Amino acid sequence: MEDNKIVELYFDRDENAIKETKNKYENYIFSIAYSILHDQQDCEETMNDTYLAAWNAIPPHHPLNLATFIGKICRRLSLNKWRSSSAQKRGGGQVELSLDELEGCIGDDHSFRESLEEKYLIETINEFLSGLKESERKVFVCRYYYFDSIEDISKRFGFTLSKTKMMLKRTRDKLKDYLIKEGVMS
């Protein structure tokens, strides 16, 4: 079913909206949740929470891109669940590794996790990303938005591990320079 028809179902408060969303985006939502949580049961719970959150958000929101809208909800819920569980036990998953890698770019004057919530920082990072070559941008987003492993990214794009690691390091270095230039950090 087309996304605009699914959104209409939400606006009509037709419960088939959730069924159609699940039919179309279940694998996509699962991949986002699993890349952060790495636990089948937590992923299933987060997926159900995602459908409920979409039901509660549409209306009043009218998403232009349903996949992106649903993906953002799932990512936010997955990160919240990850933070909650990692506060109890520190793990060595891709989320923690990815956030640790980026902390050097953001600086010590703000914790990275707090800075992510700051609108200006987010806008500045988006501007930075728009200036990258497509391959650099996609690799960066896979690692630091979807929290994919370096191995998975290498396979997806057909790069060697060392090329992927070097591309990420160079992009982080460029990001740090860009943030300094834009006055986000010193």
Image (tube, rainbow, N blue to C red):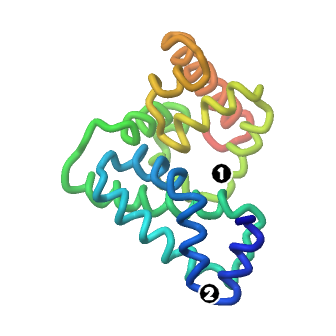
Q: Position of residue 134 (x, y in %)?
A: 75, 29
Describe the element under mark 1 as helix, strand or loop.
Answer: helix
Q: Residue at x 57, y 23 (%)?
A: 168
Residue located beneath label 1 in the image = 122
Q: Position of residue 45 (x, y in %)?
A: 35, 65
Give the amino acid type for the residue marked by disc 2 in the picture.
Asp
Q: Is residue 111 above or below residue 17?
A: above
Which part of the image, by quadrant, shows the C terminus?
A: top right
Q: Position of residue 26 (x, y in %)?
A: 51, 58
Given residues 176 and 153, the one toward you in this image is: 153
Q: Quadrant of residue 4?
A: bottom right
Residue located beneath label 2 in the image = 14
Describe the element under mark 2 as helix, strand or loop.
Answer: loop
Q: Is residue 126 above or below residue 97?
A: below
On the picture, is 64 further left or further right than 180?
right
Q: Residue at x 64, y 63 (%)?
A: 69
Q: Which mark is residue 10?
A: none
On the picture, is 151 further left or further right than 13?
left
On the picture, is 147 further left or further right than 130?
left
Q: Residue at x 56, y 80 (%)?
A: 55
Q: Residue at x 70, y 85 (%)?
A: 11
Q: Nearer the viewer, mark 2 or mark 1?
A: 2
Given residues 22 and 44, the one toward you in this image is: 22
On the picture, is 86 further left or further right than 73?
left
Give the amino acid type for the residue marked by disc 1 in the picture.
Ile
- Alpha carbon distance from label 2 to label 1: 35 Å
